[in-house]
Image: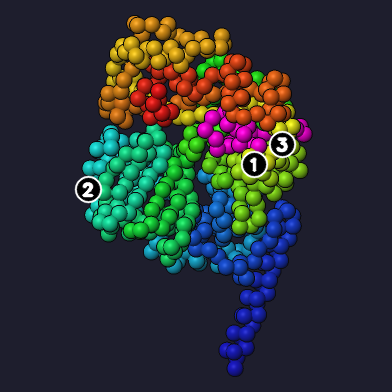
Amino acid sequence: MAFKGEQKEKEFLTKVRREEEEARAKLLAEKVDFPYLNLAFIPIESDALKLIPKEKAEKAKAAIVNREVKTLRLAVLNPDDKETQSLIAELQKSGYAIKIFIISKNSLGKALSHYAPLEETKEITGQVEISDEILTNLQKEISDIKALRQVLENLFKAKASQIVEAILAGTLILKASDIHFEPEKEKVRVRLRLDGVLEDIINAPPSIYSLVLNRIKLLSGLKLNIHEKAQDGRFSIFSNNNSIEIRTSVLPGAYGENIVMRILDPRVIKIDLKDLGIREDDLKIINQELQKPTGMILTTGPTGSGKTTTLYAFIKKILTPDVKIITIEDPIEYHIEGVSQTQVEPDKGYTFENGLRSIVRQDPDVILVGEIRDYETAEIAMHAALTGHLVFSTLHTNDAVGAIPRLIDLGIKPPIIAPAINLLMAQRLLRRVCQKCAKKRLLTKERLQNFKKILNNLPLRVKLEKELNEKIQILEPRGCQDCHNGYSGRIAVMELFEINDEMEDLILNSPAEIQIKTAAKKAGFVTMMQDAVIKIINGITTVEEAERILGKW
């Protein structure tokens, strides 16, 4: 009987201590103005928990209890603790938005106890760390696609994690933008997109691919047991003190699930406008438009033409402490410090339309709308441009002039379009010819006459660096160990269509596209084809590459 009494007393004292702990946690939460959380009543997501190692969680006295895309709910004992602040800074640097909650020691203990079942799968996290040593060794082995193929063949008997790590490292070394896994009847085709062109890497056995698929799903926070539905996720690669995000798309196919992984290198957003390959005369026009406090700049082109990179370069150009910039994107590709970025979530009712309505009420100076897809979004964006905001957005049309009829087709009235738009742009990406191995050759007479015809009536603002005559030489690709089939990197070809008073008057009458093009040429419009020819003459790209992207001349 005495034992039962002692046991009840212990249970009572334990209960009192826990209640005191929770009370202290509540008081601290009120003091530091963060919400309080009792993990005794809240489920902890194992996939979220394992985003940070147990040792780091213990040291920081914190645990991630929930994850929604790029937002983490972080439960902490004390937000002012140095180790806690260090962890928060590290997670933010990795591109996560952090929501902080105050918890008790008892709640923290419960969270840390959940690591025990995860010990067997501790290598699987939402992060892949490629050490400097591994990357250095692989850089010695992987000089081109052939070398990467050999490395992967040697690893086919290894763990899936090692195969995935090697593919990711090879992707970074070769500077690929996308990784494709395409299951076929008896093999899985692995391809990399290098400078905008897909290149075959290797054919993997289906047995290996099933392991790779599960590994990538786990890393990306996707469900292993879902095979009939499309899934999207993300994870990070840490290498050389850089955090690179990988956006994963899984799509069911006839012979299994297809994977496409987009490499989101944050170094892309550090690119200056000059690095995009914009001609000096076009750059002058763009800088003038970026200085205006109101109006809209629309950039057009197909998927993968560099529109988002260009808009991010605009933001970088105008970003100062006294300018408030808000974006609405689908999805957020790169996180920009000092910019309020939001992502559409249709399932939760946050669309481009109602998101943009909310953004306008946030008193922004500049608004970036990831894409104009419908009448409602277009209308709100146009009105924002007319009511004291500078608006950047994209539109899917083949050329700059085609944006006007496209907006009219969406239902926007010409009296709104004309005064709202400052500048229309269209762009494509061409591969740069490798300067180390390219071969010089004279233009054929036929090609020379063709170039002269294309460049006829260039506006005076465009200055050719070389005279177009029989002696002019251009470059053709060859290929060496420093490039991919004769090319290295990409450059934009652009056309700019300024909306001046004359153009406004024309747009008000709902003109046909041919009428707009005729008027634009009279006003000094330079086409993408003309820009491409100028870049060929200047030895930046090749005839073959320009015709691949823009069509035969």
What residue range appears in magenta?
A: 386-408
Instruction: Give the residue type that dot 2 points to.
Output: Asn
Determine if the magenta segment contains residue 71.
Answer: no
Residue 10 against residue 299 in the figure, above or below: below
Apparent side of residue 345 relative to residue 251 in the rendered image (left or right): right
Instruction: Give the residue type that dot 1 points to.
Output: Leu
Q: Which residue is drawn at 57% across and 68% down?
A: 43
* 511 vs 376, nearest the viewer: 511
Which residue corresponds to mark 2?
A: 154
Residue 249 against residue 386 in the figure, above or below: below
Picture coordinates of residue 546, whole percent (x, y) = 40, 25
Q: Is mark 3 on a helix, strand or loop?
A: loop
Q: Which residue is drawn at 27% across and 23% down?
A: 478
Image quarter of the C terminus: top left
**Residue 410: which disc?**
1
Mark 3, Cα crowd under 10 Å, few <14 / some 14-19 / many 20+, is some
**Residue 131: which disc?**
none
Which residue corresponds to mark 3?
A: 413
Picture coordinates of residue 122, whole percent (x, y) = 41, 59
Determine if the magenta segment contains residue 398.
Answer: yes
The reply to whether residue 214 is in sight is yes
Mark 3 or mark 2: name the one nearer the start of the chain: 2
Q: What element carries label 1?
A: helix
Mark nearer the viewer, 1 or 2: 1
